[in-house]
Image (cartoon, grey):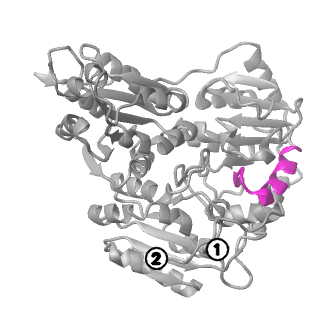
Amino acid sequence: MTTGADIIAGKLHAAGCRHAFGIPGGEVLALMDSLDRAGLRFVLVKHENAGGFMAEGGWHADGAPGVLLATIGPGAANAINVVANAWQDRVPLVFLTGCVDDAEAESYTHQVFDHQQLLRPIVKASFSARLGALDVMMEKALAIALDGQPGPVHIDVPIRVAESKTGEPWSETFASRPTAVLAAGGPDLDAARILFASAERPVVIAGVDAVNEAAGAEITSLCKSFRIPLVTTYKGKGLMPESDPLALGGAGLSPKADDILLPFINQSDCILLLGYDPIEMRINWRNPWPDAAPVIDVTPVLRTHGMHAARVSLRSHIRPAVEALAAARPRSMPSWPDGKPSETRGKLKSSFAPEPEGWGPATAFHVLRNVMPFETVVSADSGAHRILASQIWECDQTRGMIQSSALCTMGCAVPLAMGHRLVDAKRPVLAFVGDAGLEMCLGELSTLRDLKLPVIICVMVDTSLALIELKQRKSQRPNVGVDFGETDFPAVARAYGGHGVWIDNTADLETEALAALKRDGFTLLACRISNRSYDGKF
């Protein structure tokens, strides 16, 4: 006879989950045992926050929902940041927490608080596991996590439920996997067809929803068939190979890029939004076009962001909507006859060129893009380096650059890279991180060592919270709380069993990056850059 934990684990396996991440406690021992026996490898981490990002990295690699396991009280509380990140960054994360039984909680208060009340504002749903309804609960939880815009679901599992034998019926399959929603007919679709069919200067803006729907091939076909330029959010990088002349790269965080892209977009007579969620975008993208602008918003969910207006809104998945719109437009219809997309792409390229003095963050990113295999997966931490790297690094497929671009949380790049490499051992992985961000997750270098993962970490060392310091100066405030001392990161890497080296020129960076690709363990490339290296760069 199975236990409650066996059913929970079995349903996760049926949904394709093969890894679970977390830190054990007495309240989750039965869950850990069942996950292991069901075929989910449990990966011990040093902090629940990092475990959640490793789970996300695995999801980017194989498409299965991430699984994070935490014990009662402090374990659950430690994971708040990564759960909020999954909520804002549209990540299907199943968060399992252990808890004491209801009756015991009435007279036992040590580490006991209401996990569900804490988590409800930042999850799509929160469940309390109950014997007799575990199959139904897991079907609901997994379907909700994956439906529409993916996101986190929380399951609180009392000890008695996890450990008790149960004869309740359950299926070892996942039957409630969401299916695509077809574009509805009617006046909205008709209006969208007319607008798109007659446009001479159409532009596509695509984002995270298009990535999660795997709509890259359809978007690429649409753009190439009608010579339509594509702008993406940072998460949308690679929906069309960014080496393509029609690809104008990622946008949303760089004022320098915005100064080029937004005037161009406002010359369009049809702005086609394909799975574009402005949750990634900064202030320049609030009301980026007039309310009456010719905008078609293709969205799988109701948009309540208030960031911009749309003339036509189509509630649809991307692929069927693209097919319907493409069928309405003559192939001979001209698009941007004045060559503006090519001119705009050229301006963007020149704006993010390597430093003329021969060394700096832009130069480092260009060198690594040239040295690393094109299939390399890059992760990026929050900070000035991420904005610059996201403008420079070209991706030829989706999820080639993974990052926290909605919540923009620090300390995510290294565990994201670790989780991806653990699940997909074929593609090289490179993490871009600032020195402050790396300090946040140094303990996970021991996890990296124990897992024997050949992750490459490029840390930009400028002993400052550069992005915040830049904002501080621009607002004419004094320098307070943004500078710190230099850590000997190569020595730290060696102490954790990896290879670490200081880098301050392009030749050494190229040599060490090539060597890192052949190394079995992890490599930390500590790139020293001068204070205020990012001034004027993005």
Q: Position of residue 437 (x, y in %)?
A: 53, 62
- Check the picture and name the quadrant holding the C terminus: bottom right
Write the residue at 79% across / 33% down.
308
Relative to 160, say whether 186 is above or below.
Answer: above
Q: Nearer the viewer, residue 485 or 534?
A: 485
Q: Is residue 253 magenta?
A: yes
Q: Position of residue 338 (x, y in %)?
A: 89, 52
Q: Is residue 467 magenta?
A: no
Write the residue at 72% across / 42% down.
205
Res 89 → quadrant: top right
* The label number, if any, that marks residue 489 in the structure image: 2
Res 506 → quadrant: bottom right
Residue at the farthest left position = 1
Asked if marks 2 and 1 touch (Cβ < 8 Å), the reply is: no
Q: Amino acid at mark 2?
A: Phe
Q: Position of residue 26 (x, y in %)?
A: 22, 39
Q: Amino acid at mark 1?
A: Pro
Which residues lie in the magenta part? Answer: 248-267
- Please name the residue that numbered disc 1 is placed on: 361
Asked if one can make out residue 431 in the rendered structure from this viewpoint, the answer is: no
Relative to 520, say whether 210 is above or below.
Answer: above
* The label number, if any, that marks residue 384 in the structure image: none
